[in-house]
Image: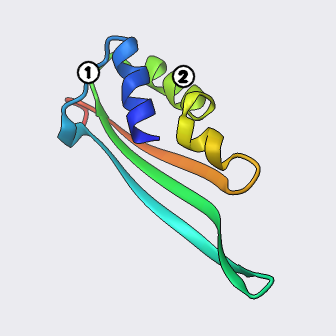
Amino acid sequence: MLGTLNGALEVREIRLDPDAIMARVTGINEIVDGLPVLTRVEIDYRLRIPKGTREVVERALERHAAKCPTAATLRGAVEVSWTAEIEVEGQG
């Protein structure tokens, strides 16, 4: 999903350095019928974005899961959720 988000930003002419776009992903397994099954994936994005781009970045975040091949593959079987911590360059 990070690649899809990065691509969505680039299409909108927002190019982030590799150290300015990161994700921490946690998979949650639960026992279902005696088997450990992946039931949830939680993604925590950390973005450092250029000043004046927050609205565009937030729109890309809202829409990226719908265009992500990985999210589409998991849809219906694994719950995928995300959060984003956004830092605007120059605003600490």
> Compared with residue 89, is residue 13 higher up or lower down, i.e. above or below?
above
Q: Which mark is residue 15?
A: 1
**Distance of label 1 from label 2 (alpha carbons):** 15 Å
> Would you identify the image quadrant in which residue 47 lies?
top left
> Compared with residue 1, is residue 15 higher up or lower down, i.e. above or below?
above
Q: Which mark is residue 59?
A: 2
Q: Nearer the viewer, residue 73 or 62?
A: 73
Q: Earlier in the sequence, mark 1 or mark 2?
A: 1
Q: Position of residue 77 (x, y in %)?
A: 73, 56
Q: In what element is the residue under mark 2? A: helix
The furthest residue to the bottom: 34
Q: Is residue 69 left or right of residue 85?
A: right
The furthest residue to the right: 33
Q: Position of residue 24 (x, y in %)?
A: 39, 57
Q: Identify the residue at image location x=19%, y=42%.
A: 19
Q: Nearer the viewer, residue 71 or 51?
A: 71
Q: Position of residue 21 (x, y in %)?
A: 29, 39
Residue type indicated by callout 2: Arg
> Would you identify the image quadrant in which residue 13 lies?
top left
Q: Nearer the viewer, residue 10 or 32?
A: 32
Q: In what element is the residue under mark 1? A: loop
Residue neighbourhood size for the residue with mark 1, other residues' Cα within 10 Å, grouped as few (<14), some (14–19), many (≥20): some
Q: Identify the residue at image location x=55%, y=36%.
A: 69
> Compared with residue 28, is residue 44 higher up or lower down, i.e. above or below?
above
Residue neighbourhood size for the residue with mark 2, other residues' Cα within 10 Å, grouped as few (<14), some (14–19), many (≥20): few
Q: Identify the residue at image location x=57%, y=59%.
A: 41
Count of numbered circles in the view? 2
